[in-house]
Image (cartoon, rainbow, N blue to C red):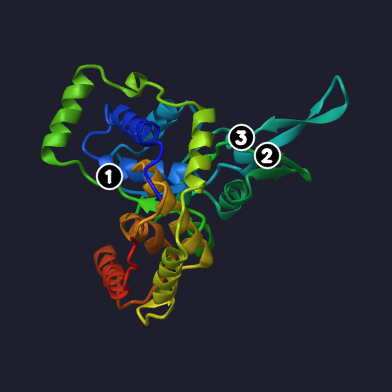
C-alpha cells in the first residue's frame, strides 16, 4: 500500500473545489462530499432551505467537470414523460420516434423533487437505479457519467409528496449547505457585485477524465477488516431500539464506495477508518426510520455518533 496518483488526484480535486468556490463561498466540506459522491458513482440529495446555493452549486459542478446539464423545477403537473421522454409519430417514416426527456444528460438537477407526484418520482427512480429509462417498452441508456442532484425543502410539507423510504435509500449522500457564515456572506455579495457568476467557473476535467477517476477510485484497496468494520457499523443501526429500520446493504455498499473515493482524493491507494468516519453520518442518517424517541436531526446525529464510537475501528498498519 502506498501513495498513488498524488499529483493528479489531489490536484484535480483541489482544482474542482477551487473553481466551484468562486461562487459558493465557505462551503468546502459540503463541496468535497458532493465530489466524493460523484467519484463514487452515487446520487446526492440536498435537503436545505431555499436560497443557499444548491442550484448554483450544481451548475458550477457541471461546468468544472465538463458535463451536460439539465434542470427541472418539479411541480405537481410535471409528468413522467417530461423526465424520461416520449414517443411521437414520425410522419415521413410512419414509425414512432423517441424524443429524449430531460434526464438524459450527465448531471440532472431535480429541483424540489418532493413537489412532484409519486409517478414522476418513480420515473426518475428507474434512471437513478438502473441507468436507463423505459418508454413504450423500449429501453434507452442514460449518458455516462450520470449524476442526479435532487433538492427538497425540509420545512413546509404543504403541497408536497414526501420521498418514500425506498427512494431516499437511492441517494448515496444527503447533505445540507446551511446558511453562510457572516464573513462568507459578505464575500459572496462582494463577488456578486464584481460580476462573478457560474459563467466564471472553468472546466478542470473532462467526462472521460471523470470516468477514469472513477475507475481508479474503484481500485483503491480496502482490507477485509475494514469491510467487516463497515458492516458492523451498519448492523448497529439495525439493532438499536431508537431506530425502527436500520441501514440497508445498499448503505454498506455506499459507505465502501465513498471511503474508497475519500482515500483516492487524498492520494492513497488504501482505505483507513477515518475515511469512513468522514462520510458516515451523511451516508447513513437519511436511510433510517427513527422512533419518536429521536425526533430531530441533532438528536439523530448524537445517536449515530454514539453508535460510531461504540464500534472499535481496526488497526491499520
Q: Position of residue 119 (x, y in %)?
A: 61, 52
Q: Which residue is mark 3?
A: 143
Kindly identify which numbered label has been placed on residue 141. Answer: 2
Looking at the rendering, which quadrant does residue 280 occupy? bottom left
The answer to whether marks 3 and 2 mark residues whose Cβ atoms lie closer than 8 Å is yes
Name the residue rendered at 29%, 29% in the picture.
18
The foreground one among 312 and 85 is 312
Name the residue rendered at 46%, 42% in the picture.
39
Q: Residue 159: in sight, yes or no?
A: no
Total numbered circles: 3
Q: As drawn, is 100 to the left or to the right of 236?
A: right
Q: Is residue 135 above or below residue 255?
A: above
In space, the residues marked 3 and 1 are separated at their CA atoms by 28 Å
Looking at the rendering, which quadrant does residue 53 occupy? top left
In space, the residues marked 3 and 2 are separated at their CA atoms by 6 Å
Q: How many other residues sit within 10 Å of disc 2, few (<14), some (14-19) or many (≥20)?
A: few
Q: Position of residue 72 (x, y in %)?
A: 50, 36
Q: Position of residue 243 (x, y in %)?
A: 39, 76
Q: Is residue 130 above or below residue 304?
A: above
Q: Which residue is mark 1?
A: 29
Q: Earlier in the sequence, mark 3 or mark 1?
A: 1
Query: For numbered disc 2, what is the local secondary structure?
Result: strand
Q: As drawn, is 23 to the left or to the right of 8?
A: left
Name the residue rendered at 57%, 48% in the picture.
128
The foreground one among 299 and 1 is 1
Q: How many other residues sit within 10 Å of disc 1, few (<14), some (14-19) or many (≥20)?
A: few
Amino acid at each position: 500500500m502506498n501513495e498513488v496518483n498524488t499529483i493528479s488526484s489531489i490536484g484535480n480535486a483541489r482544482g474542482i473545489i477551487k473553481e466551484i468556490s468562486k461562487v459558493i463561498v465557505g462551503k468546502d466540506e459540503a463541496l468535497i462530499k458532493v465530489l466524493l459522491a460523484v467519484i463514487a458513482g452515487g446520487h446526492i440529495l440536498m435537503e436545505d432551505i431555499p436560497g443557499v446555493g444548491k442550484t448554483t452549486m450544481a451548475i458550477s459542478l457541471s461546468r468544472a467537470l465538463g458535463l451536460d446539464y439539465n434542470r427541472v423545477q418539479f411541480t405537481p403537473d410535471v409528468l413522467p414523460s417530461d423526465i424520461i421522454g416520449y414517443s411521437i409519430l414520425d410522419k415521413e417514416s410512419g414509425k414512432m420516434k423517441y424524443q429524449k426527456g430531460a434526464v438524459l444528460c450527465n448531471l440532472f438537477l431535480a429541483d424540489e423533487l418532493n413537489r412532484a407526484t409519486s409517478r414522476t418520482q418513480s420515473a426518475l427512480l428507474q434512471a437513478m437505479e438502473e441507468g436507463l429509462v423505459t418508454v413504450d417498452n423500449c429501453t434507452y441508456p442514460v449518458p455516462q457519467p450520470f449524476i442526479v442532484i435532487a433538492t427538497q425543502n425540509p420545512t413546509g410539507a404543504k403541497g408536497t409528496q414526501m420521498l418514500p423510504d425506498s427512494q431516499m435509500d437511492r441517494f448515496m449522500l444527503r447533505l445540507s449547505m446551511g446558511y453562510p457564515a457572516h464573513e462568507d456572506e459578505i464575500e459572496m455579495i462582494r463577488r456578486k457585485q464584481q460580476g462573478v457568476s457560474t459563467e466564471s467557473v472553468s472546466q478542470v476535467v473532462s467526462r472521460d477524465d471523470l470516468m477514469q477517476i472513477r475507475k481508479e477510485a474503484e481500485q483503491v484497496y480496502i482490507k477485509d477488516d475494514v469491510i467487516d468494520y463497515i458492516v458492523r457499523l451498519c448492523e448497529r443501526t439495525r439493532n438499536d431500539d431508537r431506530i425502527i429500520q436500520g441501514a440497508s446493504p445498499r448503505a454498506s455498499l455506499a459507505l465502501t464506495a465513498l471511503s474508497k473515493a475519500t482515500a483516492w482524493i487524498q492520494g492513497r491507494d488504501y482505505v483507513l477508518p477515518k475515511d469512513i468516519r468522514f462520510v458516515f453520518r451523511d451516508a447513513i442518517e437519511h436511510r433510517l426510520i427513527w422512533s419518536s424517541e429521536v425526533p430531530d436531526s441533532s438528536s439523530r446525529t448524537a445517536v449515530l455518533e454514539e453508535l460510531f464510537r461504540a464500534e472499535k475501528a481496526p488497526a491499520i498498519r
